[in-house]
Image (tube, rainbow, N blue to C red):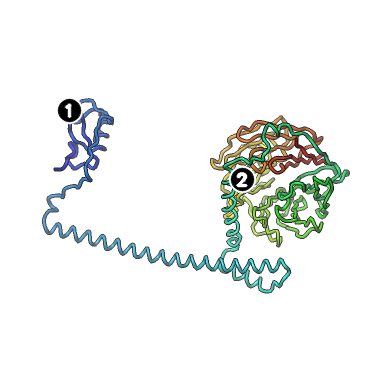
Amino acid sequence: MSLVCAISNEVPEHPCVSPVSNQVFERRLIEKYIAENGVDPMNSQPLSEEQLIDIKVSHPIRPKAPSSTSIPAILKALQDEWDAVMLHSFTLRQQLQTTRQELSHALYQHDAACRVIARLTKEVTAAREGKSLKSLPHLLSFTDLLFPAPLLFCFQLQDKATVLTTERKKRGKTVPEELVRAEDLSKYRQVASHAGLHSASVPGILCMDLCPSDTNKVLTGGADKNVVVFDKKEEQIIATLKGHTKKVTSVIYHPSQSVVFSASPDSTIRVWSVTGGNCIQVVRAHEASVTGLSLHATGDYLLSSSEDQYWAFSDIQTGQVLTKVTDEAAGVALTCAQFHPDGLIFGTGTADSQIKIWDLKEHTNVANFPGHSGPVTSIAFSENGYYLATGAQDSSVKLWDLRKLKNFKTIALDNNYEVKSLVFDQSGTYLAVGGSDIRVYICKQWSEVLNFSDHSGLVTGLAFGDNAQFLSSAGMDRSLKFYSL
């Protein structure tokens, strides 16, 4: 015997009983009635949803209508169901065949891509070793026919990003044991100062970087147009690199090779050999001053920004500009650029106080961070990839959450404070701010743990040593300083 709803007179899908009237109802119907009237529909007594008691029954089967109980009606219903099953089976067979064809085509393309990349890598390796390049043009033309030009290095970028993300997640679970604690960092004092690296007649160090594989090696760029490699341990200059026709505003040390990069308002990016002491490549990606420089995690590509409103992505081996993009709607100069740790996105700052996040593979602007009120002077991603720090000519540093795409912290600095440099340590625990002085903040609490005002000019470059064992700074007073316990 089937239960029947007192409201619809049909077999309920979710039966329940009212303790007020002892009647059975379809739950959704009685809930609607209670919501509108607040009483039992049978005796108008007060009733709430909480009072309803569910009835546990096997899955109800609705009885057939009387018109469906005749033999012709049953045969017709069976025929309709058979036709529906056959049509559904035919559709599934069609979809399966299409999927097989698409999979076969995708596997063929993947196999072709792997073979082409392997051959291309072999040719490039041979070229770097000084062997014949006769077959390279033919190989490149064949590659261009098979795939869009950016696809070849997109494989490399994606693979590197996957590896970096995995490594970062492992590191992010614990803070390195060797990392200097905040209470020890607060005791740092100046332990060395060097003022003879660049010319005294045109004073000013405008940028600096540390060698990731040997933090004793310091790279600086000066107003005297020179790039200098300095050995902190030996306290002597390793190389002075000359070639720019204007001041050097950005420098980067390659993480695994004895190679450095520099950019200048002379519109060029130069690749230098430290051991040879000479320029081995000139990248001409821009028509105006190059304002920012960042090396991709693969170590093979450079990101640059310029006052010509473009950002460019270039191959350091060939000097070839692979991509050059501008935001035509904005029409404003770019002031700085920095890769995200994974290398698939990057940020740029603009002269009209905007921070733009770009997708490297798609060449599209995927997010904008408004909030500053002056030209953006510096940006830095934290090592965990979640946070972005930005500084501008409005005497403030803003912290942005890249997951929620919003500003979660603003550090208001003194009036007329000029932010020139921002840098996180390798663990993402500390943030250093350079400009009118040097300030170090502990992340998450964003409280200040250090403040140095030893430079007599603006601080233009900052860098942490391994595990924040020391802090280095460079300034317009032509001095390179080191701080530690």
Residue 59 rendering spot, x and y as whole percentages: 23, 46
Q: Amino acid at mark 2?
A: Lys
Rendered residue at 25%/60% (across/down): 84
Q: Marks 2/1: CA distance?
A: 66 Å
Above or below for 186 versus 310: above
**Number of the label disc, if any, that sits on residue 116:** none
Q: Residue furthest right?
A: 201
Q: Quadrant of residue 125?
A: bottom right
Above or below for 141 versus 468: below
Residue 451 rendering spot, x and y as whole percentages: 73, 32
Residue 202 rendering spot, x and y as whole percentages: 86, 44
Task: Assess disc 1: are there few (<14), some (14-19) or many (≥20) residues with their C-alpha within 10 Å of its C-alpha.
Answer: few
Q: Nearer the viewer, residue 286 or 479?
A: 479
Whether label 2 touches label 1, CB < 8 Å:
no
The nearer-to-camera label among 2 and 1 is 1
Q: Amino acid at mark 1?
A: Asn
Rendered residue at 66%/71% (across/down): 137
Q: Secondary structure at mark 2?
A: strand
In the figure, is residue 35 to the left or right of 295?
Answer: left
Q: Which residue is mark 2?
A: 356
Q: Which residue is mark 1?
A: 43
Q: Nearer the viewer, residue 136 or 68?
A: 136
In this view of the protein, can residue 416 be seen by the observer?
Answer: no
In this view of the protein, can residue 151 be seen by the observer?
Answer: yes
Residue 18 rendering spot, x and y as whole percentages: 21, 31
In the figure, is residue 23 to the left or right of 178?
Answer: left
